[in-house]
Amino acid sequence: MKSRRSYRAFFAGLAVLAGVAAPAFAEEPVQPIEPPKEINLAQAELGKKLYFDPRLSRSGFISCNSCHNLSMGGTDNLKTSIGHKWQRGPINAPTVLNSSLNVAQFWDGRAADLQEQAGGPIANPKEMGFSHTLAVDLLASIPGYVTEFRLVFGTGEIDIERVTHAIAEFEKTLVTPNAPFDRWLLGEADAISPQALEGYQLFKNSGCVACHYGPGLGGSSFQKMGLVAPYPTHNEAIGLAAVTGNEADRFKFKVPTLRNIELTYPYFHDGEAQTMTEAVDVMGRIQLGRTFSDAENASIVAFLRTLTGDQPRFELPQLPPSSDTTPPPIPFD
Ligand code: HEC
Ligand code: HEC
């Protein structure tokens, strides 16, 4: 994880080396999103198919895209997700957009990276309700997949490591560069409105950047929800303490990214804040002990709207058909 200071030092150093002025954003706590690099395109193409394939669920109906809908900012826009057999999910689904920038995955960070994360939902009885063995056997029964795994990995032998590796490679492509705010950071002065700029100043000066910083404006640390006043919720999640067993980590959650925040409502791990206005108001009061006026709140929200970047664009994948030996889906039982 790069801290704000190391980014500054890095850019200042680069500038000295190149004998030019530091980039416009060198002094800012937020950096532009970089386009994806070093993607293995063949793996990402296969991963895209798997991401959209509902046959990785017991019902044959739920894919990664069901809860992380790429037409809706990589979320389901529900308080908590609906899983296998319409089960109520325990927690709000974070966006998959820019998730490759996260220090760890899940609200409590229990998966180290995207590959480790991707194995979770397939076998989660409340999400896709399947098992890794069944998922692998199912894919192995589909000739189109066997051929593609052979092309991509040099072997038609399908295992869960290769499946999650391909999905993670696809997820790395899901970054959203070129937001109006990034264009402003790069020196395009009129890329954001005066109200949004005022909102950004307030966002910095009132202390939001202590937790929401870096290219993702979040995703880099775990912080207590309710730093200066407790956050009342019926949700049972206890945050990082569930992973570390450390009482001091109770109610610390991974700071969510604020990228594309206007698309990823509702907000917070319990999904209880329906609007950005509400989320900003809660954050001001319980993280900073500050009550924003309506005008202040509106300017911060105007700033947050400038964080919507170019959404991933690609052709909808066509999935290879099942064969006569493919186990049928079990939507009802
Ligand atoms: C039934 C809904 C559902 C399905 C299906 C689902 N997810 Fe999720 N996903 C969630 C929820 C809810 C969370 C948050 C869980 C938590 O933090 O405890 C999550 C978390 C994540 C995260 C972590 C993001 C972050 O910021 O921490 C990633 C990445 C992700 N899912 C990718 C996937 C992939 C890939 C698949 C398909 C293999 C998938 N999800 C299937 C609901 C779902
Ligand atoms: C002490 C660290 C901290 C500070 C300061 C802070 N936040 Fe947060 N922010 C968090 C954490 C942690 C969460 C997730 C909490 C949860 O869901 O339980 C969060 C969540 C959010 C969300 C909802 C994101 C989502 O996808 O659910 C928004 C919007 C937000 N913060 C904006 C702000 C603004 C605006 C400020 C300044 C007024 C601010 N935050 C100050 C730590 C912080």
Image (spheres, rainbow, N blue to C red):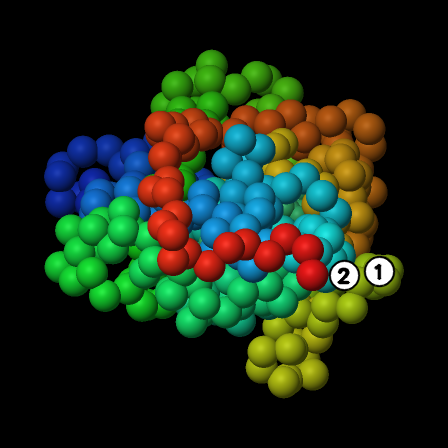
Q: Where is residue 272 in the image (x, y as percent from the top left)?
A: 80, 48
Q: Does the residue labelled 2 lie within 8 Å of ligand 2?
A: no
Report the front residue among 286 and 161. Answer: 161
Quick one: quadrant of the C terminus?
bottom right
Q: Position of residue 223 (x, y in %)?
A: 62, 64
Q: In this view, does 160 lie above or below 55?
A: below
Q: Is residue 8 visible?
A: no
Residue beneath the point at 65% across and 78% down: 241
Q: Earlier in the sequence, mark 1 or mark 2?
A: 2
* Classed neighbour count for the residue bearing mark 2: other residues with Cα under 10 Å, few (<14), some (14–19), many (≥20): some
Q: In which quarter of the image is residue 258?
A: top right
Q: Is mark 1 within 8 Å of ligand 2?
A: yes
Q: In this view, does 217 lie above or below 221?
A: above
At label 2, the amino acid type is Gly
Q: Residue furthest front?
A: 324
Label annotation for residue 233? 1
Q: Nearer the viewer, mark 1 or mark 2?
A: 1
**In this figure, which residue is indicated by the disc labeled 2?**
226
At label 1, the amino acid type is Thr
Q: In this view, does 246 lie above or below 126?
A: below
Q: Quadrant of residue 138?
A: bottom left
Residue beneath the point at 46% across and 59% down: 327
Report the front residue among 72 and 63. Answer: 63
Q: Position of residue 273 (x, y in %)?
A: 78, 44
* Distance CA(mark 1)–CA(mark 2): 11 Å
Mark 1 element type = loop
Quick one: quadrant of the N terminus?
bottom left
Mark 2 element type = loop
